[in-house]
Image (cartoon, helix red, strand yellow):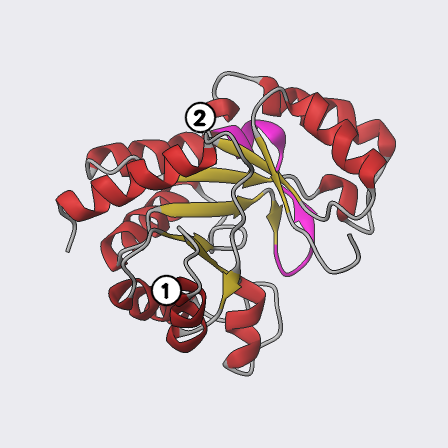
């Protein structure tokens, strides 16, 4: 049920992103892993869509249904005292209406953050930049209608797809710089292991940025 707790948790998560030090979000996939991280005194937690799918016997890439994914996210959220942000892949639907409904359902199960990819799985196609902007606007409006300042993070997949073409990069990065695209609170650029890609993408998007990290760093 949506209430004051969700609004407060979303605002807390937003403040953590804006703190003087980078926010480290450890990925979890079930209640047990989430409780381990919470008890290690991390101030917020993130789910991994890939890890959740794998734990239930599915390959990555929206093969698991949105309902199953939300069920896991909801069970995790119900046991935590810290804010939870969820990786919901490419939104489980190509239309703004579908993504809007997903965002509303995500808030209803207790998550206060959303990571949304700019690809359409499982075929790996990238969402048209204008369509991506519309999807982000739909998420923002859904969250606003519920009174929860959902922390939105938009994942830039372009440079990490097998079909990447440098000629396509300027148009997609330009969409990030549009005021509508900045309806996302942060841009997420996967993998900080290759620092030129990371730093170049971060400078290009003209907004706060997040990345993934590994032991290779």
Residue 131: in magenta span: yes
Query: Where is residue 90 drawn, in percent x and y?
Result: 54, 51
Q: Which mark is residue 183?
A: 2
Front residue (pair 99, 53): 53
Indicate yes or no whether the magenta region holds residue 94: no
Residue name at image x 50 percent, y 16 percent: 179
Q: Quadrant of residue 4?
A: top left
Asked if residue 194 is positioned above or below residue 108 in the image, the reply reads: above
Dot 2 crowding, Cα within 10 Å, few <14, some 14–19, many 20+ = many
Relative placement, left or right, of 2 versus 157 is left
* Residue 139 percent across, percent down from the top left: 37, 38
Give the residue drawn at x 68%, y 52%: 213
Residue tagged 1: 73
The residue range painted magenta reads 121-133
Q: Secondary structure at mark 1?
A: helix
Q: Residues within 10 Å of mark 1 (few under 14, many from 20)?
A: many
The x, y position of residue 3, in whole percent, is: 13, 47
Q: Looking at the image, is 33 positioned above or below residue 95?
A: below
View extreme (bottom): residue: 57
At mark 2, the secondary structure is: helix
Pick whichever of labels 2 and 1 is earlier in the sequence: 1
Given residues 129 and 36, the one toward you in this image is 36
Q: Quadrant of the N terminus?
A: bottom left
Look at 38% across and 33% down and name the residue there: 15
């Amino acid at each position: 049920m949506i209430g004051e707790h969700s609004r407060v948790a979303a605002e807390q998560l937003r403040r953590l992103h804006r703190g003087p030090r980078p926010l480290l979000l450890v990925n979890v996939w079930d209640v047990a892993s989430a409780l381990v991280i919470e008890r290690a005194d991390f101030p917020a937690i993130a789910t991994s869509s890939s890890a959740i799918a794998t734990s239930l016997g599915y390959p990555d890439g929206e093969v698991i249904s949105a309902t199953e994914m939300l069920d896991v996210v909801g069970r995790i959220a119900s046991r935590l005292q810290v804010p939870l942000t969820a990786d919901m892949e490419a939104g489980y639907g190509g239309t703004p209406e579908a993504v809007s409904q997903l965002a509303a359902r995500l808030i209803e199960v207790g998550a206060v953050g959303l990571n949304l990819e700019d690809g359409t799985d499982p075929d790996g196609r990238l969402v048209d930049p204008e369509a991506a902007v519309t999807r982000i606007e739909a998420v923002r409006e859904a969250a606003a209608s519920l009174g929860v300042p959902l922390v939105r993070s938009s994942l830039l997949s372009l440079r990490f797809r097998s079909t990447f073409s440098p000629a396509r990069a300027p148009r997609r990065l330009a969409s990030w710089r549009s005021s509508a695209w900045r309806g996302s609170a942060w841009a997420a650029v996967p993998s900080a292991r290759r620092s030129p890609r990371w730093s170049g993408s971060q400078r290009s998007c003209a907004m706060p940025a997040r990345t993934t990290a590994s032991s290779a760093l």
